[in-house]
Image (spheres, grey):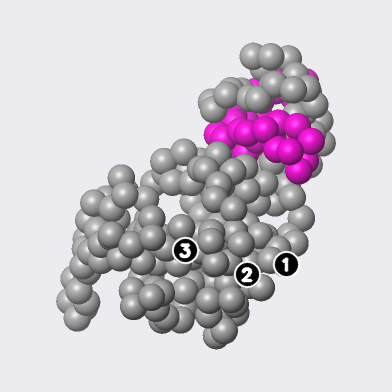
Amino acid sequence: FRILCRSDFRGKAMRALSRFIVTDDVEVRELPGSAVGVIGPLSSQRLSRAWQALPQKPFAQAEASLEGRPVLLVRDTRFGLDGYQLWVGPDCKAFCADWIAQHCDCAAVDSEVLEILRIEAGIPTAGVDYDESNLPLECNLEHALNFTKGCYTGQEIIARVTYRASVSRKLMGLLVKQDTIPTPGEEILFQNRVIGRVTSAVQSPRLGGPIALAYIEKEFLSVSEVELKSSGTGAEMRPLPLAPPNL
């Protein structure tokens, strides 16, 4: 298994994985490197100029090379768009990004664009939208769970919540009605009662205004109109993703 994480979470991820290795014949080791993302409706078409055999299933991988440099192609459709990750060595990221831009007609974008796509797709970020106190079922991460496998750490509570109860809160999407971007931690009101809080927010050109991710108490998940406490701005509440997939 290969795991990609933010550099500031590297040590924490290594410790978490190592903690659960008891008698298993497993080794956890660091693989230095970086990832270059190619995201958009024409990703497969453009990357086929460099590689004909592209992986097709989500998270499928294919080993390749770029002018003699090893590249791992990883199918990435998390954003509801055609896309790939290109995993490269620690000194190859800039070269790979420049080569893709020049030869595959891909425009370079900054992290703000990725943040917009992330929130439109309802993808939570560790340390921002969730931490160890959250259940995956609260965080729009059901797709990351296998409900038919054997025993695993946390299985009991996941099974209990899934089959016998429900989560006490759920990550939802907000379409803000005025041109005011909510701030993380801002409280959400319904009939003057606090029912949740914002975790992430951006301005979305595709959806025509500010959008946000927010945790909402379970008894209010069917509510359609809420209010942001600090600004008094109204917002429409929707299940995730906020933007429909375009694959």
Task: Inspect the image, locate mark 3, and give the three-letter code of the amino acid beneath it.
Answer: Trp
Residue name at image x 39 percent, y 46 percent: 132
Q: Which residue is mark 1?
A: 247
Query: Residue 140 in magenta?
Result: no
Instruction: Please report the residue visible at 53 percent of the width from the left and 59 percent of the height from the top.
Output: 101
Q: Is 67 on the left-hand or right-hand side of 136?
A: left
- The residue range painted magenta reads 188-216
Q: Main secondary structure of the magenta part?
A: strand
C-alpha distance separating marks 2 and 3: 12 Å
Residue 22, visible in the rendered structure? yes
- The amino acid on which the numbered mark 2 sits, given as a three-letter code, is Arg
Residue type for callout 1: Leu
**Residue on which the image places disc 2:** 46
| Mark 1 crowd level (few <14, some 14–19, many ≥20, 10 Å Cα) | few
Q: Position of residue 218 (x, y in %)?
A: 66, 41
Q: Earlier in the sequence, mark 1 or mark 2?
A: 2
Q: Is residue 89 left or right of residue 190?
A: left
Classify residue 150 by image quadrant. Answer: bottom left
Residue for point 54% across, 27% down: 184
Q: Cβ–Cβ below 8 Å for labels 1 and 3?
A: no
Report which residue position mark 3 lands on: 99
**Figure check: 222 above or below 229:** below
Q: Position of residue 174 (x, y in %)?
A: 71, 36
Q: Nearer the viewer, residue 114 or 96?
A: 96
Of residues 28 and 139, the one drawn nearer to the viewer in this rendering: 28
Please name whichever residue, 44 or 245, is drawn nearer the observer in this view of the structure: 44
Looking at the rendered structure, the number of numbered marks drawn on it comes to: 3
Q: Is residue 212 magenta?
A: yes
Q: Earlier along the polypeptide chain: callout 2 or callout 3? A: 2
**Mark 3: few/some/many CA within 10 Å (<14, 14-19, 20+):** some
Numbered disc 3: secondary structure: helix
Q: Nearer the viewer, mark 2 or mark 3?
A: 3
